[in-house]
Amino acid sequence: MKIAFVPGAADLTLQVDPAMAEPYQLSFDGVLPEVRPVTDGVVVDFPRSFHIGDRRHGGQIVLNAAGPWTVEVQGRTSRVDADLRELRLAGIDLQGGVEHVRLDLPEPHGRVPVRVAGGAADLTIRRPAGVPVRLAVAGGSTRLTIGERHFDTVQPTYVFTDAGFEESEDRYDILIAGGTDALTLA
């Protein structure tokens, strides 16, 4: 299944409910998006007047934990809190940059890609303890934290790889293109 947001996502909370019978539940404040069920999931299409800074577009999304999900945003992502720890996650694809976003990731099944295009400001990614990850940042980074390590700046192309990443079947492969400011990988 896939949940896709166009032309962006702002002021949203994503959660998972393993007991829920429906594939998803959506509730929004203020201006309502068009919600279109599609063969492989749902598209949440905000009106053309959608502006990321406009706080009239908040909402809550609850996903059923039964099947693998892909989360996609075609546009900017701002002020999103995604607690996906109980989800079977197939991947995350955020296009258009992110700011003030927290992703709590579940145990991976296989190699799970997490892609951010357009840069990131104030992005926190938390993975389960012991899960190996490769983090590649293209475009440089300031205020980067990986576990207990802190970097004021890193080179324009920076790759961090946990020991055991290549050997592990279950892992996260994270790519952030466009640079970062205040990125935390825990």
Image (tube, grey):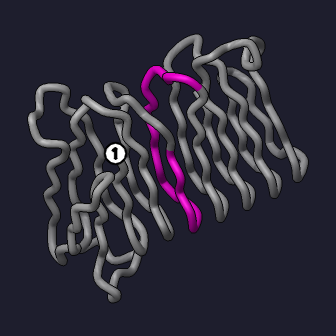
Quarter of the image for residue 69 reads top left
The residue lying at 25 percent from left, 29 percent from top is 66
- Quarter of the picture containing the N terminus is top left
The residue lying at 61 percent from left, 32 percent from top is 185
In the rendered structure, the answer to whether residue 174 lies left or right of residue 136 reads left
**Residue 70, placed above or below residue 36:** above
Task: Residue 52 in the image: state x and y as whole percent.
Answer: 41, 74
Quarter of the image for residue 98 reads bottom right
In the rendered structure, the answer to whether residue 19 lies left or right of residue 181 reads left
Disc 1 marks a residue whose amino acid type is: Met
Task: Residue 127 in the image: state x and y as whole percent.
Answer: 52, 25
The residue lying at 17 percent from left, 74 percent from top is 32
Is residue 183 a member of the stretch shown in magenta?
Answer: no
Return the residue nearer the eye: 164 or 13: 164
Return the residue nearer the eye: 51 or 107: 107
- Quarter of the picture containing the C terminus is top right
Task: Mark 1: give few (<14), some (14-19) or many (20+) Cα within 10 Å.
Answer: some
In the rendered structure, the answer to whether residue 17 lies left or right of residue 110 reads left
**Residue 52, placed above or below residue 17:** below
Residue pushed farthest bottom? 49
User: Which stretch is magenta?
Assistant: 92-110
Task: Residue 158 in the image: state x and y as whole percent.
Answer: 85, 42
The residue lying at 30 percent from left, 33 percent from top is 67
Task: Residue 31 in the image: state x and y as whole percent.
Answer: 18, 77
Query: Which residue is tagged 1?
Result: 1
What secondary structure is found at the residue carrying circle 1? loop
**Residue 72, placed above or below residue 87:** below
